[in-house]
Image: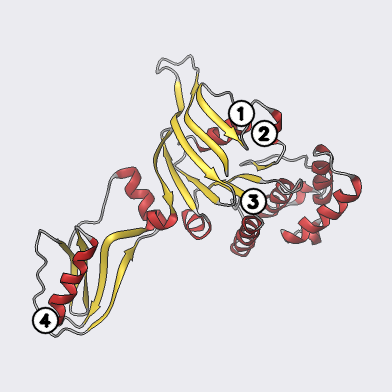
Amino acid sequence: MKVIEVHDLTKIYQTRLRKGNVVALDGVTLEVEQGEIFGLLGPNGAGKTTFVKALLGITQITSGTALVAGLPPQDPLSRSRVGFLPENHRFPSHLTGLGLLEFAGRLHKIRPGRIHERADSLLQLVGMEKWAGTRLRKYSKGMSQRIGLAQALMAEPDLLLLDEPTDGVDPIGKVEIKEVLKRVREEGKTVFLNSHLLSEVESLADRVAILSKGKVKRIGTVDEFTRRSLRYEIEAAIGNERIDIPEKIGRRISITTKGMTVELIKEEYINQIIDQLRMKRVMIRSVTPVKITLEQSFFETLTGAEEKPA
C-alpha cells in the first residue's frame, strides 16, 4: 500500500524580484510504501521542507498531484493519521513536557484517560520521564527534539513526517531516537524524514531520494546507493605477479601486493579474474563487492564526481 503518492509535483513561489519567481519543487515524482522508513536528502535550499509542507497542505501546490493515505493534502482527513515534527519547532514554552503531550492529546480529541496513559508511555519511550514536569523553556535542544518526537507520536499515527528529527541531539539520544523509529516501523507504520545527517539515514532508512534544486536526482534503496555493483575488492597474495585486466571486460582501480580492486563491465567477468589468479597460483582470500558510504553516493549524485582509477 502506498502511503505517499506524488506525481509531477511543482511549487513556484511568486516574487517581485528581478530574477523572477522561485521554483522550489520542479516535477517531483515519488512514492512511499507503508511500513518503510524513507529518507529525503538534499543540500540546503533543495526543497525538502517545501515538499513536506505540500504534503501537509501548509503550502499550496502549483501543479501536479499529491496523495497522503489516498487523499489530497487539501482534505483535512489526509492528516488525521499523520504525526509531524517540524524543523526548528516552537512549542509554547510555558508548558511542561507532560503538558505539551496532554495538549496534543486534546487537539487529537483523544479521550482523557487515554491521554494520560499514552503520555506516560511516550515519555518513557523517548527517555523524558524525569523531565515531564519541567517547563519547555528550560529544555536543551536535544530534550526539545525528544519531546517533539513524543508529541508527533501522541495520536498513534500511521505516518510520521519528521524534519531533522535528531538535530541537536547528543550521540546517545540519536541512537535512542533511531531505535524508536525502528520500533515504529516494526509496528507497520511509515516514517518519512528529512535529514542532513547522511550516516544516520544510511543506518536507518529503507529507501532514499536525493533532491537538488527542486528535482529528484536519484531514488532507490540504501543498498543501491552504497553498492558498487560491478566493483570488487579481491584480497589475494599477489606479490609481484602481473595481473592484467583486458579492456573488454573492465579495468583495474588499484593493486598492491595484498590484493586489488577491479571494476567490470559484466558481473560474470569476475570469474575470469579469479581464473587468472588461480592459473598464477595466487592464493585468494576473499572477493567482496565494494561498498561506498551514502555520503559518497550523495556527493557523486550531486556533482557527477567519481573515484578515478589508480
Can the viewer see residue 55?
yes
Does residue 121 appear left or right of residue 253 in this picture?
Answer: right
The residue under the point 45% across, 43% down is: 42
Give above or below for 263 relative to 4: below
Q: Which residue is mark 4?
A: 279
How packed mark 3 is, by other alpha carbons closer than 10 Å (few <14, some 14-19, many 20 or more), is many
Q: Quadrant of the N terminus?
A: top right
The quadrant where residue 263 appears:
bottom left
Q: Which residue is mark 1?
A: 72
Q: Which residue is mark 2?
A: 78
How packed mark 2 is, by other alpha carbons closer than 10 Å (few <14, some 14-19, many 20 or more), is some
Give above or below for 226 relative to 302: below
Asked which secondary structure carries label 1, the reply is: loop
Q: Which residue is mark 3?
A: 189
Does residue 296 appear left or right of residue 9 in this picture?
Answer: left
- What amino acid is found at the position of numbered circle 3 in the picture? Lys
The residue under the point 71% across, 58% down is: 126
Asked if the residue at tag 4 contacts the one at tag 3, i.e. Cβ–Cβ closer than 8 Å, the answer is no
Q: Earlier in the sequence, mark 1 or mark 3?
A: 1
- What amino acid is found at the position of numbered circle 2 in the picture? Ser
Label 1, label 3: how far apart the Cα atoms are? 20 Å
How packed mark 4 is, by other alpha carbons closer than 10 Å (few <14, some 14-19, many 20 or more), is few
Q: Quadrant of the C terminus?
A: bottom left
Q: Earlier in the sequence, mark 2 or mark 3?
A: 2
Asked which secondary structure carries label 4, the reply is: helix
- What amino acid is found at the position of numbered circle 1 in the picture? Pro
User: Where does residue 163 sit, x and y in percent of width and height?
Assistant: 59, 44
